[in-house]
């Protein structure tokens, strides 16, 4: 196993598509790159897909990840938004296959459980854990950026590095943060 | 307006993706090409999307259509199948935008109404009208191939050629076919 693996995470969206790249060495993730590729709601759908597809592919080609991960699409209330997400995920999956890069789809609860230890964590908790895990001064914004990094971290841990302890680093960090917060009361 | 326009229709599907190319001169469509691009259900999703995407793009680049049309995705009982169709439609929409080719999405009932005069026509009626309209000896098979041609015909009539009479050529042809069937009884 190489000492370090690079994972590119994608939070697929038609208006804001989060792209985050991390290196994972042992179980420690380090920020490489994060951005949000945007398209305008008043553009034609095919132009939006072209813009988002080109943006994600540019990040793949610049950072050359060992693996790509994206959030799995689920049925939601808004079918139109689900369709946009599915269309982008198709483009990203195909881009990965075209480059011979392994690609995985993770459910939102898998990602949340991996980084916060809690599958129903809210966006703020995820962003805060991403901040801690990557040793950043502030949580990446908007939420799509933090989510893309969370997906990359979850995938980096999930497939690349065997677990050494019964609790994940996220769980340990979260427990430490909770203990610190309690001690400040 | 050019004397003839070429339309490529796509019936998006993960297992069988129909691709049909026609030329429309005045209101008469002529078959140029039809194929079904396939992928195997036991392949990884990203490999399936790559295979289908490459197949459709090869047809676009070989036949250089003036317009591309595909069936609009709707919610169906089988969410997984809808997702596959949406993923492929994203890839086709993006491929059209990348090549500067206008692309349209048509609902199934728009396509059926255009070619048979009846928005709730069944697959067999659509295939039979495609056969008549393109002056073929037999209806294209499988249904995905006939559907792709029906989508191309509907789009070719819809946007490219002004209507000259109150009934569509399909309605006229269907009426003639019905009259012929009645006269044979």
Image (tube, coloured by chain):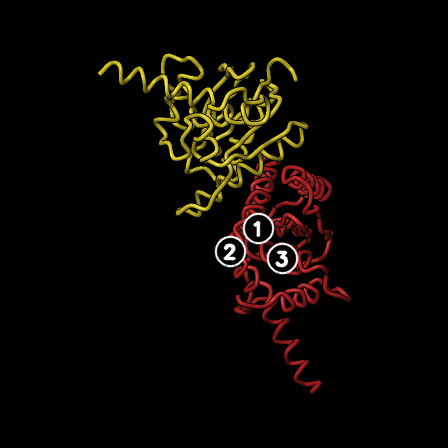
Chain colours: A yellow, B red
Q: Is residue A87 above or below residue A167?
A: below
Which is more foreground, mark 3 or mark 1?
1
Please give the name of the residue rendered at 36% of the width and 17% of the height, measured from the top-left corner.
Answer: A176
The residue tagged 2 is B76
Q: Rounded to the nearest whole Å, what is the CA distance between mark 2 and mark 3?
A: 25 Å
Residue B81 image label:
1
The residue tagged 3 is B153
Around disc 1, counting alpha carbons within 10 Å, would you say few (fewer than 14), some (14 to 19), or many (20 or more)?
some
Picture quarter with the C terminus of chain B: bottom right
Q: Are marks 2 and 3 in contact (CB under 8 Å)?
A: no
| Nearer to me, A52 or B134 | A52
Labels 2 and 1: the sequence-earlier one? 2
Please give the name of the residue rendered at 51% of the width and 56% of the height, measured from the top-left corner.
Answer: B76
A124 sits left or right of B98 in the view:
left
Q: Is residue A18 above or below residue B43?
A: above
Q: Is residue A40 above or below residue B38?
A: above
Around disc 3, counting alpha carbons within 10 Å, would you say few (fewer than 14), some (14 to 19), or many (20 or more)?
many
Q: Quadrant of residue A103?
A: top right
Which structural element holds mark 2?
A: loop
Which structural element holds mark 1?
A: helix
Q: Rounded to the nearest whole Å, what is the CA distance between mark 2 and mark 1?
A: 8 Å
């Amino acid at each position: 196993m190489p000492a370090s693996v690079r994972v590119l995470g994608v939070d697929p969206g038609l208006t804001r598509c989060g792209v985050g790249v991390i290196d994972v060495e042992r179980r420690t993730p380090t920020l490489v790159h994060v951005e949000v590729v945007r398209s305008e709601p008043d553009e034609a759908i095919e132009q939006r897909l072209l813009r988002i597809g080109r943006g994600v592919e540019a990040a793949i080609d610049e950072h050359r990840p060992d693996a790509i991960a994206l959030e799995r699409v689920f049925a939601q209330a808004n079918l139109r938004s689900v369709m946009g997400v599915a269309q982008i995920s198709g483009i990203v999956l195909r881009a990965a296959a075209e480059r011979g890069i392994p690609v995985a789809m993770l459910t939102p609860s898998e990602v949340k459980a991996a980084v916060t230890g809690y599958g129903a964590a809210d966006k703020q908790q995820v962003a805060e854990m991403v901040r801690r895990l990557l040793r950043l001064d502030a949580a990446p914004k908007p939420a799509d950026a933090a989510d893309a990094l969370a997906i990359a971290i979850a995938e980096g841990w999930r497939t690349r590095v065997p677990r050494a302890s019964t609790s994940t680093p996220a769980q340990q960090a979260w427990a430490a943060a909770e203990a610190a917060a309690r001690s400040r009361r």
